[in-house]
Image (tube, grey):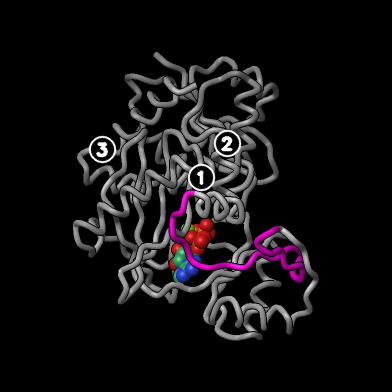
Amino acid sequence: MKKVAIIYGGMSSEHDVSMVSGQNVIENIDKTKYEIYPIIITKDGKWIDKREKEIKDVFKLLKEMDVVFPVLHGLYGEDGTIQGMLEMAKVKYVGCKVLSSSVSMDKVYTKIIFEKAKIPQAKYIYLRNENTYIDENFEEMYLENDKIISLVEEKLSFPVFVKPSNSGSSIGISKAKDGAELIKAIADASIYDKKIIIEQAIVGKEVECAVLGNEASSVGQILPAEEFYSFNAKYENAESQVIIPADLSEEKIEEIRKLALKAFNAVDGSGISRVDFFVEEGTEKVYINEINTMPGFTEISMYPKLWEKAGISYSDLISKLIELGLENN
Ligand SMILES: Nc1ncnc2c1ncn2[C@@H]1O[C@H](COP(=O)(O)OP(=O)(O)O)[C@@H](O)[C@H]1O
Ligand SMILES: [Mg+2]
């Protein structure tokens, strides 16, 4: 039997989400094929086993594994850091490698890659430390708040979304309808990252496509129960719904699947990702929103649901990801 470590929890703001994802994986993994070693990373960075005993020599334990499945979301998990540690330990692991993980975690750098790949996305402005504007040529300019408001009015139009470059689960993200809301939103986002993105709000459908190996799934649609898919709408409001397939023509679905694979390849992804898009009302134009290299992985999350519709059960999906991890190092 192959020895598989499932690492979950983690030091990011998405610790709790990862706890649920990890527990679901442990419950459903095929125990006739894999001998499992659950490892929890606590919020303050301790590595503990399922009896809550601290693991003294993490590196040694990792080296004994055939493969590691890091079911971690956000910083210190989805951002290339644990992937780097696993590379150093020379152990095989599930999912994206160091570069694709870190590029995909950082919204500024994902946007630069998508621009290069000519994948359409919402217009945006990049700020650092709340008031430093970084232009298309990476020239920096300090701007007072009123100048930032004018810049947004000139380059974009309200409403806009304000996001920390490195975050997830909608944490630190808000929608701003005017200058005053914009300045508050920038301050809120700055709690999470010094890099901030201000982005044109797209009115339309929010859809997602799952990538497994080199295949794209069908496309699912989010019906958020709130004004946008906020943390609360994602995890706490039971009225948020997903529909598969999305309410789109077959041609649109095909277009989105192709773009999902293109985005995945553009960031040099491997194994797993969920690629998120908007389809604009009226124009039906597709905009990429982001790529998640470790998407929500509970039984009711979009990623497993999309594969379930394609005939791959949650348990088989875990096996496929592990087999890909074993092949791919
Ligand atoms: N440009 C945009 N236009 C419309 N809605 C957006 C836009 N950007 C983000 N949103 C809304 O905010 C949510 C969270 O933003 P997202 O960029 O996906 O961050 P996260 O990485 O935290 O999931 C999205 O699921 C969507 O509902
Ligand atoms: Mg998102």
**Of labels 3 and 1, the one closer to you:** 3
Q: Which residue is mark 1?
A: 19
Other-residue count near label 2 (Cα within 10 Å), few / some / many at <14 / 14–19 / ≥20: many
Give the distance between the C-alpha atoms of the residues marked 1 and 2, in whole angstroms. 8 Å
Q: Amino acid at mark 3?
A: Ser
Q: Is residue 239 visible?
A: no
- The span shown in magenta is 117-137
Q: Which residue is mark 2?
A: 40
| Lower position in the chain sequence, tag 1 or tag 2 | 1
Q: Contact (CB < 8 A) between labels 1 and 2?
A: yes
Q: Quadrant of the N terminus?
A: top left
Query: At x 19% / y 57%, what residue is drawn?
Result: 250
Specify the quadrant of the image occupied by residue 124.
bottom right
- In the displayed structure, does residue 144 sit left or right of residue 305? right
Q: Which residue is mark 3?
A: 313
Give the distance between the C-alpha atoms of the residues marked 2 and 3, in whole angstroms. 25 Å
